[in-house]
Every structure is written in C-alpha cells, then in structure tokens.
Image (cartoon, helix red, strand yellow):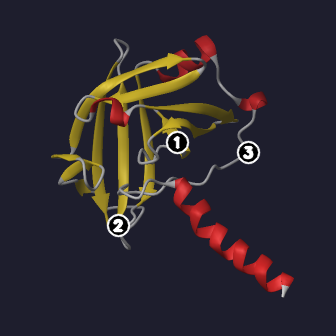
C-alpha cells in the first residue's frame, strides 16, 4: 500500500515538473542542454558581453503543437537593441517560412519579427520584447564547452524557448 501511494505521488509530481519547463502559453519547447551548465563553463562579465554584442543568437526549437519546428534568431545590436525573428517548418531542418505571428499563443503580434532590448546584468544575458513589455523580460546564463554554447534560463516567463543549445554568429 505504501509503495502504491509513493508511486501515485511520483506520477502526480511528474506532470508538474514537465510544466515548469515551459509556460502553458508557449508556442515552443525549451531545448535540452548539450552539456552540463556549471560555474566553471559559464561566461561572465566582459567575456559574456563580448560573446553577445553585435552577434546573432540562433536556436531551433520544437513547437508545442506536433509537427512544428521554429528557427528563432535574436540580433543583439551593440546599442542594446534587439530584433527577434521567427521562421517555422515541419521539420527541424526546414524548409523554413516566415511565422505568421511572434510571441506566446495568447499574447502575440502579427508577423515574423519583433523588437526589444538586451543587456548583461549580474553576469546574465537579459532581454525584453518591446511589444509585450515587462511580461516578456527574462535572463539567461550562457555556458561554453569548446565551440558549443548553451543558455539556461534564470528568470522570467518560461515561454522564451531560448534555454538549450544555441549558436552565436
């Protein structure tokens, strides 16, 4: 009887843990980290700013609806502005086409682009979309292993989908 109760409690806990990974209104899922994120491989201070400033942050994520994938970019301009763009496909390899909207399922703007701001604060990459205001603010730690990069969400709404393997160009 005790084993059954423990199994039931464990089963009830699993869906809650999965939901913590993404917001219920998110259009895409966070990606898996390609390696363990630790303080030893975390980019901080000037190294983090240098890695991001003037670069394009790219990440491909699976959609929350079966059979959809998203290729997302954030152009991180040196002046602190950011352009977020979205492309969609039926496979993680494309072919890609412009998204009809960008944002969460319930709160979004028409079209495949949005603007916002970014900065480095407390050794984290923080970004906010202009269209959604502070509801869209979030911060992420960046980690590097060899040539591979990963982002781990530290704060904000879980609908960003940035967490996971990322590319900087």
C-alpha separation, residue under disc 3 versus residue under disc 1: 14 Å
Task: Measure the alpha-carbon separation of dots 2 and 1.
Answer: 19 Å
Crowding at label 2, few (<14), some or many (≥20) Cα neighbours within 10 Å?
some
Q: Up-down: is 27 above or below 77?
A: below
The residue that appears at 25% across and 28% down in the rendered structure is: 130
Query: Which residue is painted at 35% across and 36% down in the image?
Result: 136
Disc 2 designates what residue?
68
Q: In this view, does 127 lie above or below 98?
A: above
Dot placed on the residue nearer the N-terminal end, 3 or 1: 3
| Quarter of the image with the C terminus in it | top left
Mark number for residue 166?
1
Q: Where is residue 49 in the image (x, y as percent from the top left)?
A: 53, 16
Sequence-first tag of 2 and 1 = 2
- Kindly state the secondary structure of the residue where label 1 is placed: strand
Query: Callout 1 environment at 10 Å: few (<14), some (14 to 19), or many (20+)?
Result: many
Quadrant holding the N terminus: bottom right
Verify CB contact (< 8 Å) between mark 2 and mark 1. Answer: no
Horizontal side of residue 28 vs 122, given as left or right = left
Residue nearest the observer in this picture, 133 or 93: 133
Residue under label 3, please give it.
36
Q: Which element carries disc 3, helix, strand or loop?
A: loop
């Amino acid at each position: 009887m005790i084993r059954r109760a423990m199994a039931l409690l464990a089963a009830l806990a699993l869906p809650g843990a999965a939901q913590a990974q993404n917001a219920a209104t998110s259009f895409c899922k966070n990606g898996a980290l390609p390696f363990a994120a630790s303080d030893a491989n975390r980019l901080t201070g000037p190294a983090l700013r240098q890695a991001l400033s003037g670069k394009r942050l790219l990440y491909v994520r699976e959609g929350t609806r079966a059979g959809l994938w998203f290729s997302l970019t954030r152009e991180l301009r040196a002046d602190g502005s950011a352009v977020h763009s979205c492309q969609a496909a039926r496979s993680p390899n494309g072919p890609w086409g412009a998204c009809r909207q960008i944002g969460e399922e319930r709160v979004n703007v028409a079209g495949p682009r949005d603007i916002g701001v970014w900065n480095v604060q407390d050794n984290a990459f923080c970004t906010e979309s202009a269209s959604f205001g502070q509801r869209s603010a979030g911060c992420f730690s960046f980690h590097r292993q060899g040539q591979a990069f990963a982002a781990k969400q530290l704060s904000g709404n879980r609908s960003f989908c940035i967490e996971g393997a990322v590319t900087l160009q």
